[in-house]
Image (cartoon, helix red, strand yellow):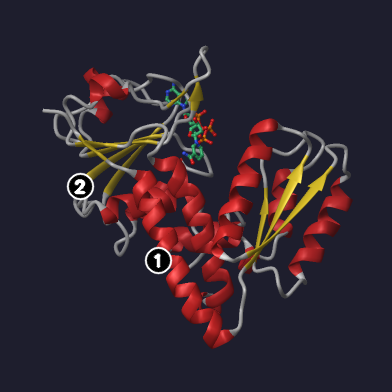
Amino acid sequence: MSAKIIDGKLISKKILEEIKIEFEILKKKKNIIPGIALILIGNNPASQIYVSSKAKICNELGFHSAIERVDEKISESDLLNIINKFNSNKSIHGILVQLPLPKHIDENKIIEAIDYKKDVDGFHPINVGKLVLGQKCFIPCTPLGIYELLLRYQIETSGKHIVIIGRSNIVGKPIANLLLQKNSGNATVTIIHTGTKNISSFTKEANILIAAIGKQNFVTKEMVKENCVVIDVGINRTTDKKIVGDVDFENVKEIVSAITPVPGGVGPMTIAMLVKNTFSAAFENEKF
Ligand SMILES: NC(=O)c1ccc[n+]([C@@H]2O[C@H](COP(=O)([O-])OP(=O)(O)OC[C@H]3O[C@@H](n4cnc5c(N)ncnc54)[C@H](OP(=O)(O)O)[C@@H]3O)[C@@H](O)[C@H]2O)c1
């Protein structure tokens, strides 16, 4: 039997519609327009596409977006000045610096310069710490999108064994922390990385397997348990310029109960969660 396809495109559309309705109500009550600043450094084509599509979706909802395009030779101090300018701008509620940064700029310093109350990417150490402590905070968009997909498809996480392949700061670690918390997952979580031996022995035990590796076809049918749920975070470009995930989708879907496709799974959720975080930054000050 073929798996249920977890449709991130459909769910993200629904979420954006829900935000739009809530926004129309709150706009009249509070007279606030959520504003996001998107800082784009250099000419990386993928980054340019990501930033434009983030701005486009925000604009379609009636949010305010400001794209700050800067030369890749910008000095660290000039970039810090731009961030400070947005930190003190009251019409900007969310700030996003598109990564990766040029090598001469210290990524940690830049992320730490963002006011954590405007850190809609959830990368600031204060938000990371709050997530670990189970406190309200901005949660990075991709993990939050995965969590939202599991909720909306009513996939039980409590008491389940969730195996995550990848321990990056933007996907693996935050999704592990989120799903571990008693009130948001309550799962038993295993994290796999390049230091893990006999990876299949762990993945075969998973009720839910989350792949965030960045390697095409890394997860094969032989590595998964029958009827488990597979979330594929990977975005890989094939030699014929197609986008594929980290999972051998065609074969794995034959034995699992549900699976996200690539494209159309986690990807659209990431942008929807950025909009959600920006909305929260504008309207839910009590969050902090
Ligand atoms: N859909 C979306 O919106 C979205 C958002 C973000 C990222 N992504 C995609 O998700 C993938 C992962 O992104 P990322 O930023 O987390 O990547 P990353 O920073 O490169 O991390 C990859 C992780 O996978 C682990 N890994 C790599 N090869 C492995 C192997 N052979 N065995 C075991 N573990 C291995 C690495 O382990 P070590 O730590 O030991 O090196 C690392 O922890 C990429 O394809 C990226 O494009 C998608």
Q: Which residue appears at 40% of the width and 52% of the height?
A: 12
Residues at discs 2 and 1 in contact (Cβ within 8 Å): no
User: Are there few (<14), some (14-19), or many (20+) residues within 10 Å of tag 1?
Assistant: few
Beta carbon of the mark 2 residue lies under 8 A of ligand 1: no
Q: Nearer the viewer, mark 2 or mark 1?
A: 1
Residue 169 drawn at (x, y percent):
53, 44
Q: Nearer the viewer, residue 215 or 181?
A: 215
The residue under label 2 is 160
Residue 69 drawn at (x, y percent):
79, 47
The residue under label 1 is 18
Q: Quadrant of residue 106?
A: top right
Q: In the visual, does 94 lie left or right of 187?
A: right
Q: Amino acid at mark 2?
A: Lys
Quarter of the image with the N terminus in it: top left
Q: Point out the residue furthest to the bottom here.
A: 29
Q: Which residue appears at 54% of the width and 63% of the height?
A: 61
Q: Nearer the viewer, residue 285 or 169?
A: 285
Quarter of the image with the C terminus in it: bottom right
Q: Which residue appears at 85% of the width and 40% of the height?
A: 71
Residue 249 drawn at (x, y percent):
30, 24
Q: Which residue appears at 43% of the width and 29% of the height?
A: 193
Say whether residue 135 is visible: no
Q: Amino acid at mark 1?
A: Glu
Q: Determine whether the residue tagged by mark 1 lies in a helix, strand or loop.
A: helix
